[in-house]
Structures are given as structure tokens and as C-alpha cells.
Image: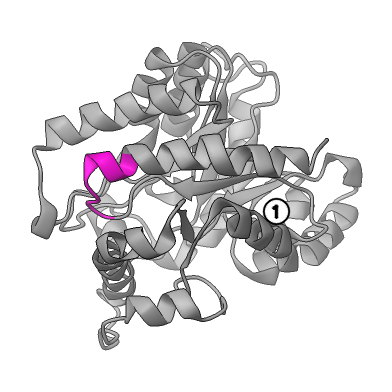
């Protein structure tokens, strides 16, 4: 199994630093992750967060492409319905060209009402829009489409559809599924069969809600407040603009101690050996080829981020690589 690192470039008010320094540091970490053997680096997207969440992942991926040579670069995810499809096709092609054919385009439908308001997009039509965009991207990257075309003849599209219906839709379209959970595999497999696609081409990948430490009890007091902020802010923004009440603050110790019941329900904080076992259990027999971990957690100090990248690449990755040998 391949292992990647993921960046959201959050800059919370409580731990705020110079944004230019943060961006420079993350580019340094992209270079370091490649040097340490990471298989991929992923960037994500949100808008109008109080902590300056990365708003344009393809722009940042282009910068990372210029600083790296081997590692694959992905969006996990990019909110496609906020964009015109032709613009997305061109931007992705440019990143693929700059990187020499290393782009993995992960797309999601989004969920946050203020973001759709900002771009004048229809949140009610987001799934229908994304489904249509996938086919349009394939057309635009073909003959008679946008110029220049991507380096990759079949640029990978990864669909961040959560839940069984989404997994099935991704399969019917014959695209990759951005999920690392074994529970998504049966529906994804069924969708591939319904769409007449070869099951040998099934590809899954996704993030793990967790942090890897060579001394968890030493590091947890430092990381826990950042975990609490990250979970609380996600939960707060999920209901913004919906009229639903803001959820109560999370207890990070409780998040760490309970099993996962879905997104934002738990956080695994453990040694490389135990994390490897957790990944194996979560992915099961599904065709998950890549898992990634957030290099930072909402404003974590630079030294802690650098150490986490080192442990992910130097300690955890070899353990998961052994599974493929």
C-alpha cells in the first residue's frame, strides 16, 4: 500500500502565523516528504473559513509540482460544482503538464451553503452537477477539447462520494473512488459491474483520521487542542447557513478512545505499528492502493509537523509497504 501526506494549510486565530511563512513552510514539507519517500501529496479546499483554509488546491499543487520531481500530487478534494468545467479542465491540464503527468484529480460535491453562495452555484444540484462534470472533463481532455491537453492520456479522476449511493455512482462512471473504507467496496464493485467496467481496474484511496507518533503519550497533550479545534470547526461549518444548531464542543480524549462511526466521529492517535494495523482493518480486502494522513492538525507548530511527516514516511510507510511484498 502506498502512503501520502495531506495539507489543508489551516491557520487558526489561536495559533496564527504569517500566511506567507505558512505557505513557504508547506512547500518545504512537500519537498521533504518526497525526499523521505512519500508516494503522494494531497491538497484540499474550503472557502471563507476563519483559519484561511486553502481555497485553491490546484494552484498550490502547481507550486508543489515545481518543487518536486517524483511524488504524485492530488486534490482530496476539490469542490468541482463551484467551477466552470472548462476552467477546471484547463487548470488540471496545466498542473499535469507542470508536474510531468503526476496529477490525481480528486473531486467532491461540497456541502457548505456559504461556499455555494460565494460562487453563485446551486447547492441543491451539486451531485447532479458533479456527475455531469466528470463526463465533460473526459470530453474536454480528448480530441477537439481544451489545449494543451494533459500529459496523462487518462488523467485519474477520484470521486469523493461518501456513502453507498455515492460509491455505486463512482463505479458506474468507471472512475476511482476516494474512500479508504472497506465498507464502500461492495457498492463500488456493484457500480463498476453495472457500468460494464472491468473490476480489475477498481481503484480506491483516501484519508485516515489520525496521527502517527513514536511516543503517543508524550505527544498527545500537544496535539489534542489542535484536534479539538479541527473537529469543532468542521462541525460548526457543516451547519452554517442551514438553521441547524451548532454541535457541542468535542472531547478530544473521547474522540481518541472510541471506534469510528463515520466521518468526524473518532481520531486515531497511535504508534506506527498500531496505526498500520488500524489501516489494514479499515481497508480490509478493498482495492485501496493509497492512504494519506494530514501532516498538520490545525495550526500545529512547525517542528511537530516536520516530525509527523518524518514518522509517516520513515516509520509507517515501510510497514504498509511490507504488505505489498
**Residue 6, above or below 115:** above
Q: Nearer the viewer, residue 165 or 288?
A: 288
- Measured as percent of width and height from the top left, residue 56 is found at 32, 38
Q: Is residue 243 left or right of residue 140?
A: left
Colouring scheme, one of rainbow, by chain, secondary structure, one colour: one colour
Q: In this view, does 188 lie to the left or right of 74?
A: right
- Measured as percent of width and height from the top left, residue 168 is found at 74, 62
Q: Is residue 1 visible?
A: no
Q: Is residue 55 left or right of residue 269?
A: left
Q: Which of 70 and 216 is in front in this view?
A: 216
Q: Residue at x 12, y 54 (%)?
A: 15
Magenta segment: does it hold 289? no
Q: Which residue is drawn at 46% across and 12% down?
A: 98
Indicate the secondary structure of the residue bearing disc 1.
Answer: helix
Magenta segment: does it hold 303? yes
Question: Dividing the image into 4 quarters, which one contains the C terminus?
Answer: top right
- Measured as percent of width and height from the top left, residue 188 is found at 77, 59
Q: Nearer the viewer, residue 273 or 91?
A: 273
Q: Which residue is drawn at 28% across and 73% down?
A: 232
**Residue 85, above or below 251:** above
Give the residue at mark 1.
170
- Measured as percent of width and height from the top left, residue 319 is found at 67, 43
* Picture quadrant of residue 277: bottom right
Q: What stretch is highlighted in magenta?
A: 298-305
* Picture quadrant of residue 134: top right
Q: Is residue 81 visible?
A: yes
**Residue 121, above or below 268:** above
Amino acid at each position: 500500500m502506498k502512503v501520502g501526506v495531506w495539507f489543508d494549510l489551516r491557520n487558526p486565530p489561536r495559533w496564527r502565523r504569517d500566511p506567507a511563512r505558512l505557505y513557504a513552510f508547506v512547500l518545504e514539507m512537500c519537498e521533504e516528504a518526497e525526499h523521505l519517500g512519500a508516494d503522494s501529496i494531497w491538497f484540499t479546499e474550503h472557502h471563507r473559513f476563519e483559519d484561511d483554509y486553502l481555497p485553491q488546491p490546484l494552484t498550490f499543487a502547481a507550486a508543489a509540482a515545481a518543487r518536486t520531481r517524483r511524488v504524485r500530487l492530488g486534490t482530496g478534494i476539490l469542490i468541482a460544482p463551484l467551477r466552470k468545467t472548462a476552467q477546471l479542465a484547463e487548470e488540471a491540464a496545466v498542473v499535469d503538464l507542470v508536474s510531468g503527468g503526476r496529477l490525481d484529480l480528486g473531486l467532491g460535491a461540497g456541502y457548505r451553503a456559504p461556499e455555494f453562495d460565494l460562487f453563485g452555484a446551486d447547492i441543491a444540484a451539486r451531485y447532479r452537477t458533479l456527475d455531469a462534470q466528470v463526463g465533460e472533463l473526459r470530453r474536454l481532455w480528448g480530441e477537439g477539447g481544451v489545449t494543451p491537453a494533459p500529459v496523462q492520456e487518462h488523467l485519474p479522476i477520484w470521486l469523493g462520494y461518501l456513502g453507498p449511493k455515492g460509491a455505486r455512482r463512482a463505479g458506474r462512471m468507471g472512475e476511482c473512488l476516494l474512500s479508504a473504507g472497506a465498507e464502500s467496496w461492495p457498492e463500488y464493485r456493484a457500480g463498476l459491474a453495472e457500468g460494464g467496467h472491468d473490476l480489475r481496474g477498481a481503484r480506491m484511496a483516501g484519508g485516515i483520521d489520525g496521527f502517527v507518533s513514536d511516543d503517543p503519550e508524550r505527544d498527545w497533550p500537544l496535539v489534542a487542542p489542535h484536534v479539538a479545534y479541527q473537529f469543532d470547526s468542521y462541525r460548526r461549518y457543516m451547519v452554517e447557513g442551514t438553521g441547524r444548531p451548532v454541535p457541542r464542543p468535542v472531547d478530544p480524549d473521547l474522540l481518541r478512545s472510541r471506534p469510528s462511526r463515520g466521518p468526524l466521529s473518532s481520531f486515531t492517535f497511535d504508534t506506527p505499528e498500531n496505526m498500520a494495523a488500524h489501516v489494514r482493518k479499515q481497508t480490509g480486502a478493498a482495492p485501496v492502493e493509497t492512504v494519506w494522513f494530514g501532516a498538520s492538525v490545525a495550526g500545529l507548530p512547525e517542528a511537530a509537523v516536520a516530525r509527523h511527516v518524518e514518522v509517516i514516511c520513515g516509520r509507517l510507510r515501510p510497514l504498509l509497504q511490507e504488505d505489498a511484498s
